[in-house]
Amino acid sequence: MFFDLHCHSVSSDDSRATVQQFLKWITALRKRGYQIDGLALTEHRKYDRDADYSALSQEYDIMLLKGSEMDTRHGHFLVFGVNDRLLREVDFTDIRMDGMELVRAARDAGAIAIPAHPGRKGIGLVNFLSDGIDLQQIGVVEGLNGSARPEENELAQRLVQEHGLSMTGGSDAHFVSAVGLCMTKFLYPVRNVEGLVEQLLGGHLRPIRLEETRSVTESKETP
């Protein structure tokens, strides 16, 4: 299953794409032989608790889940499995919160927080390793980001290799044609946000680029 775990719709202050526009583009990509099975909407510094994408999910035959991208003192983090407990305990607008406190709060609430684009200058986790970050408490990071420079992804993947971490992929799409450029390949189907968190914790995943999914689709169609 191929899941884009990092997308921003117009609900984020720096995106121009609506959720439906993303889905129409994905429909066009599927007609060209690419495979995209799921999308996580990770809006900046917020969680769209009341947004209901179930009708769009059914109409376009794609799994749509909600998350958040949060700013912390230790860089940006993607948060999945947001629930009432986490919303009570964490201020999603607090850009000065401790990144490791967020990781612990998410874990205790049954959610997960993973570093986004950790190799990015200024806002990636690699800039804050000297602060005593315990990477074993993190376990998984975004190793392939569609909007990152090659050297930023290289830094992220070096972090993964040196510390034995798992890594995800996400497009970090802020405009329509960027969606799906980088994704996460899951070993097992993702049926809900709880299953997503479980697989992220279990490490049954790897990052993948959009063009790699075409060969998978073609192999399924070969008699």
Image (cartoon, rainbow, N blue to C red):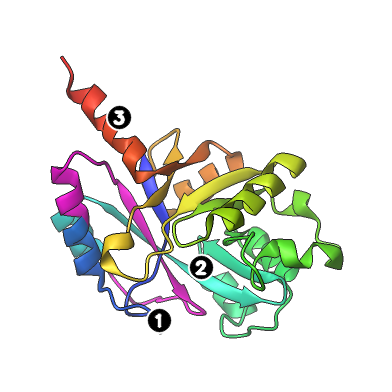
Q: Is residue 50 magenta?
A: yes
Taking the image as shown, residue 46 lies to the left or right of residue 7, namely right
Label pair 2/1, CB-CB below 8 angstroms: no
Q: Amino acid at mark 3?
A: Val
What number is the disc on residue 83? 2
Mark 2 Cα shell of 10 Å, populated few (<14), some (14-19), many (≥20): some
- Mark pair 3, 2: CA separation: 35 Å
Distance CA(mark 2)–CA(mark 1) = 25 Å
Give the mark, 2 or 1, whose residue is nearer the N terminus.
1
Q: Which mark is residue 14?
A: 1
Instruction: State the image coordinates of residue 3 (x, y, percent, origin top left).
Output: 38, 48
Q: Amino acid at mark 1?
A: Asp
Q: Could you say where residue 112 lies in the image, as x and y percent from the top left? A: 59, 58
Query: In this picture, is 203 found above or below 139?
Result: above
Identify residue type, mark 2. Answer: Asn
Which of the pair 170/146 is nearer the observer? 146
**Label 1, residues with CA under 10 Å away: few <14, some 14-19, many ≥20:** few
- According to the picture, the residue beneath numbered tag 3 turns out to be 216
Q: Which mark is nearer the camera, 2 or 1? A: 1
Measure the alpha-carbon separation of dots 1 and 3. Answer: 33 Å
- Give the x, y percent position of residue 175: 31, 70
Q: Is residue 206 visible to the viewer in this orientation of the structure?
A: yes
User: Magenta stretch?
Assistant: 26-52
Q: Nearer the viewer, mark 3 or mark 2?
A: 3
Q: Which mark is residue 220?
A: none
* Residue 192 seen in the current view: no
Q: Is 14 placed left or right of 32 in the picture?
A: right
